[in-house]
Amino acid sequence: MKKILVTTDFSNKAKTGLRFAIQLASQQVVELTFFYTYHLIKPTIWSDADFASYKKNEAAKNEKKLRQYVNSIYKNKGIIPKNIKYVVKEAIFADSSIREYALNNHFDFICAGTRGAGFQKKILGSTTTSLINFSTVPIIAIPQNYRMNSIKKLLYLSDLTDLDNELKKVTDFAKPLGAKVALLHFTSPDGLLDKKYKIAEAVKKCEKGAVDFYFKDFKKTDRLISKINDFATLFKPSMIIMFTKPNKGFIEKMFYGSNSENYAINAKVPLLVFNKKD
């Protein structure tokens, strides 16, 4: 059974991540762990015993709050919770706490909501963008305008490097959902000729009809995010999937740094980001 760590800070906008996780769990059997991290400061006049008692009480209070928060979303959607857990953890930095817990407890994905565009909102959403840049566990970033819908079509952005490994991960994610996969690659017309053999070999390893391939011309003056959004407007994917590693490959260069963060925050559909292997 796949394990998904679903993060929240109890805000209204963070509910999008929970709603997506609940939708995902309605289409396949997964275990959802709802996770809240918080930070406590010890007053200088308190003894260690006083602070330990305070920490215990706060942990119990926050777990109760988390349970009520999550259950209210299930109740609002008319869904009975199944295979769910609740975890609260005190830590200074939320992003590192989430990454550490997900890695040590062998989670398959981390699901987190984003907060929208703009400087102030980007700072508020810095936990999710930090996870995208540094987590070795795949991240599912959910935009603030997400509404629960059946996951039917996945748009996989590919630079065609490590295609066998990446395509297997994408199709393994898609198959339990019964979702269709579209592979989108941007290239010059001449550049595509050199990749035909690699594409043909990858197609042979896929189940018949499991993946559709789309190749679009790309010029140096084009903006990749705009080109992706143009295609997504027509294709209407339920999710966008990409593999990212700083300074490696065509897609990674275009999405490196603030560009990848901006896309995750501004995206109109959920974004699944895998860490690209060497």
Image (spheres, rainbow, N blue to C red):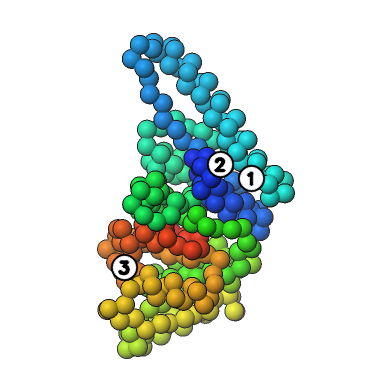
Neighbor class of circle 2 (other Cα within 10 Å; few <14, some 14-19, many 20+) is many
The residue identified by callout 1 is 73
Label 3 – label 1 distance at C-alpha: 37 Å
Amino acid found under the numbered disc labelled 2: Phe
Q: Position of residue 221 (x, y in %)?
A: 27, 78
Q: Compare residues 146 and 275 and report the one nearer the observer.
A: 146
The residue identified by callout 3 is 254
**Rendered-image quadrant of the C terminus:** bottom left
Element under disc 1: helix
- The residue at the point 38 percent across, 24 percent down is 41
Question: Which numbered mark, 3 or 1, is in the foreground of this view?
Answer: 1
Asked if disc 2 and disc 3 are in contact, CB closer than 8 Å, the reply is no
Q: Position of residue 199 (x, y in %)?
A: 44, 80
Instruction: Give the left or right position of residue 243, taking residue 250 as reference.
Output: right
Label 2 – label 1 distance at C-alpha: 12 Å
Amino acid found under the numbered disc labelled 3: Met
The residue identified by callout 2 is 34
- The residue at the point 60 percent across, 38 percent down is 69
Q: Compare residues 18 and 155 and report the one nearer the observer.
A: 18
Q: Position of residue 66 (x, y in %)?
A: 57, 35
Q: Is 166 situated above or below 47?
A: below
Q: Earlier in the sequence, mark 2 or mark 3?
A: 2
